[in-house]
Amino acid sequence: MSNAERLSHKVLIPEIRIKNRIKELSQQINYDYQDKELVIVCVLKGSFIFFADLIRELEVPLSCEFLGLSSYGGKMETSGEVKVTLDITEPLKGKNVLIVEDIVDSGLTLQYMLNMLRARQPGSLRVCALLHKPDAMKVKLDIDYLGFKIGNEFVVGYGVDYQERLRCLPYIGIVEKEH
Ligand code: PRP
């Protein structure tokens, strides 16, 4: 049995709260981008479930792009070194770009991504994140659309993994202990 299978967790944010918050976030995004076109970027792997639920609430014309970034490599703390595992295919120059992240923890992934995408000269560049750990931030960054602020706990589920496991939980869970 692997460590992930032995990991116990409890519910931190239930499915219904995520669903309701996504409705609120999408209303704000629909309002802010009315009469505009959007390139919406799913940051793999962690944001694929949040992304899929969010875009189905959006009414603005959009194209979907996928950007693979990784820095945890199965560990509970960031290595600090961000690796690009998959790049966006569409040119971003002059476009309205919205990054969709599952979680902003240390902020190092987001900082790397903002620098990478700003260099492609988008017309606008904003960030939507489901979860944010303000106390863990190592850099100062703004999140334009935020689902929930959480404490410094290790969370799993709704796309977020521990050693590639538990992404498929329909809620956000908080890891309690290994036993
Ligand atoms: C997670 C998460 C974010 C990043 C946030 O990705 O999806 O992209 O960490 O952490 P940070 O703010 O400390 O940089 P991870 O590297 O675990 O890859 P994954 O999404 O493929 O699981």
Image (cartoon, rainbow, N blue to C red):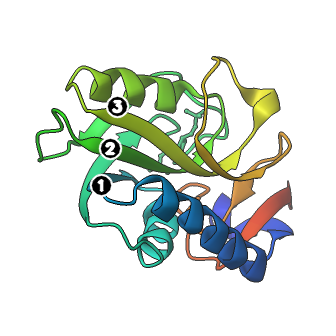
Whichever of labels 2 and 3 marks the residue nearer the N terminus, that label is 3
Q: Is residue 118 left or right of residue 19?
A: left
Are the two marked residues, 2 and 1, in contact with CB atoms closer than 8 angstroms?
no
Which mark identifies residue 83?
Answer: 3
Which mark identifies residue 73?
Answer: none
* Residue 32 at x, y percent in the picture: 48, 53
For disc 1, the neighbor class at 10 Å (few under 14, some 14 to 19, many from 20) is few
Residue placed at 19% from the left, 45% from the top? 88
Whichever of labels 1 and 3 marks the residue nearer the N terminus, that label is 1
Q: Kindly indicate the quadrant of the structure image that contains residue 137.
A: top right
Q: CA distance from mark 2 to mark 1?
A: 11 Å
According to the picture, the residue beneath numbered tag 1 turns out to be 36
| Local SS, label 1 | loop
Q: Is residue 34 left or right of residue 121?
A: right
Amino acid type of disc 3?
Answer: Lys
| Local SS, label 2 | strand
